[in-house]
Amino acid sequence: MWTKSAVLGFVAFALIASGLAQTRQTPVRPSAKPVDPISGILDAFKTHSVVALGEGDHGNEQGHRLRLALIRDPRFSPIVTDIVVEFGNALYQTVMDRFINGGEVDSAQLRRIWQDTSQLNTVWDTPIYEEFFRAVREVNARLPPERRIRVLLGDPPIEWDRVKTFKDIFAQMREAGDRDAHPTSLIRREVLANGRRALVIYGDFHLDRTPPALRTGCQPGSTIPCFPGSIVDQLETVAGVRAFNIRTVTAVDLRTLQEDVADWPVPSLAVLSGSALGAIHYREFLPGGPLVVGPGGASQAGSPGLLRPMEEAFDAVLYLGPPSSITYARFPDALCADAEYVQMRRRRLALGPGLAPLPC
């Protein structure tokens, strides 16, 4: 006959043994380790034709400086043939090709590249985006023609002369592909089909991997809005090419997710797979768990897409420093003095609901 104390002792021993066994079966993950971001990005091209680099919050100067240092690095042009950007209207690809190869382009025509995208607001009107194009032009000026970098404009080819209402923008995107489908087709046609390699620079939500269950409604006759996934999703499911995607973290302090990030060099890149940082929920990398637009409209940060490990959504994170250190490019005063620009931008802002007013 077992006494009560003996039974309790046995149960306690069993629980301890079970815990020890579980500990042995589930080893503690190591911390994510920082590497030099330029070297890390270029190393990714050894095994991937496409490396997708998130911008972080649009307009941040730290990410801009990193991108300039990357394209100016002498190791970049022998490896990377194309740069695909969100901040350019594909309608002006021939203008960009001419400009990037040293040709003469009128400044009024050049700025239509970033001012005439599908975005109604001033997101691309700060100087850093034009500066990026000019930096590529300067790099190309030192390279032989066969090694020059091509910049591919990823935003759908919107013709603003045909836009009278907000719906007109979507009508044109139905013809050319939306803001994820169009760049995916572009990459497949201009990069992958020609055996080239591309750096893709886009907002981070265009680059994350979406759980298959959320990519719904794309069957013929479906009444659910079609959401085939991000650029990376579509490249991997349709083109069968594994991309290496990087989330740039600017609005969340990574030091709260992994303590030793405080000792990381700024900037740093860290691969997520198998690390403690990679096991953390995707939502923890977002400021305050914002609303996310999916196939069923806006959903809370607790959606299945954000409650999975971060390593399932991204391959790496780019650390640019704590949020308090991030600075943003200033809207140029010269644009406020340009009556034609002000009239154009106010007219477009009036087409969309709830947009911030022109900062003039």
Image (cartoon, helix red, strand yellow):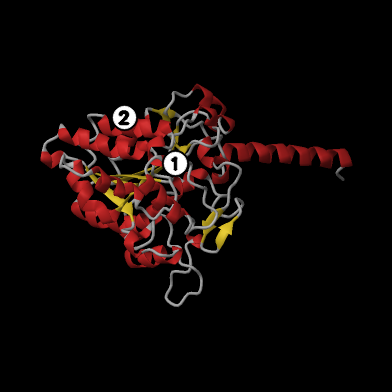
Q: Earlier in the sequence, mark 1 or mark 2?
A: 1
Task: Please count the marks in the image.
Answer: 2
Instruction: Determine the CA span between mark 1 and mark 2.
Output: 18 Å
Seen in the picture, residue 58 relative to 300 is either above or below; the reply is: above
Dividing the picture into quarters, in which one does residue 137 lie?
top left
Assign a secondary structure to mark 2. helix
Dividing the picture into quarters, in which one does residue 231 lie?
bottom left
Seen in the picture, residue 9 relative to 159 is either above or below; the reply is: above
Identify the amino acid type marked 2: Ala
Q: Nearer the viewer, residue 159 or 217?
A: 159
In this rendering, position of residue 269 left or right of residue 10:
left
Residue 50 location (% of width, % of height): 31, 46
Residue 118 location (% of width, % of height): 39, 55
Q: Nearer the viewer, residue 43 or 116?
A: 116
Q: Residue at x 43, y 55 (%)?
A: 347
Q: Residue furthest bottom?
A: 221
Residue 318 location (% of width, % of height): 43, 35
Seen in the picture, residue 48 relative to 347 is either above or below; the reply is: above
Residue under pointer 1: 58
Query: Residue 177, labelled with which disc?
Result: none
In this rendering, position of residue 259 left or right of residue 84:
right
Query: Residue 69, labelled with which disc?
Result: 2
Query: Pointers 1 and 2 in contact (CB under 8 A)?
Result: no
Assign a secondary structure to mark 1. loop
Q: Nearer the viewer, residue 171 or 219?
A: 171
Can residue 212 be seen by looking at this rendering? yes
Q: Residues within 10 Å of mark 1 (few under 14, many from 20)?
A: some
